[in-house]
Amino acid sequence: MSVKLFEPIQLRDVEVRNRIFVAPMCQYSSVDGVPSDWHMVHLGTRAVGGAGLVMAEATGVVPEGRISPGCPGMWADKHVDAWRPIVDFIKSQGATASIQIAHAGRKASHAPPWEGSGLLSEDDPGGWKPFGPSDLPFDEDYAIPQELTVDEIHDLTDAFGAAAERSLAAGFEVIELHFAHGYLAHEFLSPISNRREDEYGGSLENRARFALETAEKVREAIPDHLPLLVRISASEYVDGGWDLEQSIQLCKWLKDIGVDMIDASSGGNSPAQKLEPYPGYQVPFAAAIREQVGIATGAVGLITEAHQAEQILIDGEADVVLLARELLRNPYWPLNAAHELGHDIKWPVQYERVKSA
Ligand SMILES: Cc1cc2nc3c(=O)[nH]c(=O)nc-3n(C[C@H](O)[C@H](O)[C@H](O)COP(=O)(O)O)c2cc1C
């Protein structure tokens, strides 16, 4: 009996060897946006561990688009040069190399978690003034963002396109746009963070304009044979805020633009969000989008067990699963999951002698 989790998936001309994707995870370990040896080991280990697709973390399309001064970037050629050997290693292990390109909007300029994640003001070393659709802070201890002008919005859309081109030059085969978690695109989408009165605010069409123009620009920058993924927050769990219904409409528009898969996450745009996560808590979003939009989806969030992951695919709730924290605890999760599900998987030749029987 074939195991769904280990069936390859075709994303345009890219065949991913199985349906276990490494979710993007900030490592706060770059200098001036340049990824480091840490990324080689962190991402490389998960490729060795058998994941189908390994996605590099939220990577700033401009310096001000980083969450922290330690986040990576893709705004200069030096970034392409630094990412290339990491990408080459991921591919050498049979995994697909992917990158999430991002702009952190009003949630930019924070310290890494091990330094408390606090706001870095313009006066702090490494800090800067964040931008957003409106001058509304995320929370009391966050910066009041500077409202973007229409020209600046257009420049950012172009920056996403340029970052996509650079990502391809570095060898990445799959690009994901980070439109989730209360970062810039999500801030535009949500009436909670977007109070603009021009063509980028107000109606759903207007709030979606930045996301759609960005997706269009990036789709144009990518050749037809390569796929484009988008991560959204399908709900922000606040009355009167961004919700599944609006997400479904957004995903229909994204599908028309040529987006190939929706990575269905949630939350992150309001400290008032009401959420009690439980295993697979975001899977219903992936299922609803898959069914109502007719687009491939990725399920993410507290997926930690092989049988749980397999069942999501068997039930047709998603086309792939993305794992984050469990793959930090155990980068060899895919190899072990294959054993648990009775699927014969190829281990790296260097480790073959210790493969579970
Ligand atoms: C250390 C860490 C860093 C993260 N960084 C990102 C990121 O760069 N981009 C993103 O979209 N989500 C990020 N996330 C969220 C994960 O991709 C994932 O959606 C979330 O952790 C839920 O999945 P899990 O239960 O498997 O951990 C991060 C999560 C963790 C734990």
Image (cartoon, helix red, strand yellow):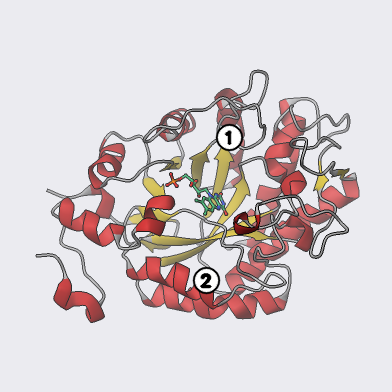
Q: Secondary structure at mark 1?
A: loop
Q: How many numbered marks are there? A: 2
Using the image as rendered, state which of residue 32 and residue 285 is in the foreground. 32
> Which residue is denoted by mark 2 in the rendering?
39
Disc on res. 230: none
Label 2 close to label 1 by CB (< 8 Å): no
User: Is any part of residue 213 visible from this angle?
Assistant: no
Work out how far the residue at label 2 is from the one at label 1, CA to CA, in angstroms.
26 Å
The image shows residue 311 at horizontal and vertical percentages of 26, 38
Residue at 23% over, 43% down: 307
Q: Is residue 129 left or right of residue 268?
A: right
Within 10 Å of disc 2 (Cα), the crowding (few <14, some 14-19, many 20+) is many
Disc on res. 267: 1
Report the amino acid beneath label 1. Gly
Q: Secondary structure at mark 2?
A: helix
User: Looking at the image, is 186 positioned above or below residue 224?
Assistant: above
Using the image as rendered, state which of residue 108 and residue 206 is in the foreground. 108
Placement of the C terminus among the 4 image quadrants: bottom left
Residue at 49% over, 32% down: 293
Using the image as rendered, state which of residue 166 and residue 85 is in the foreground. 85
The image shows residue 172 at horizontal and vertical percentages of 53, 68
Report the amino acid beneath label 2. His
Using the image as rendered, state which of residue 254 and residue 26 is in the foreground. 26
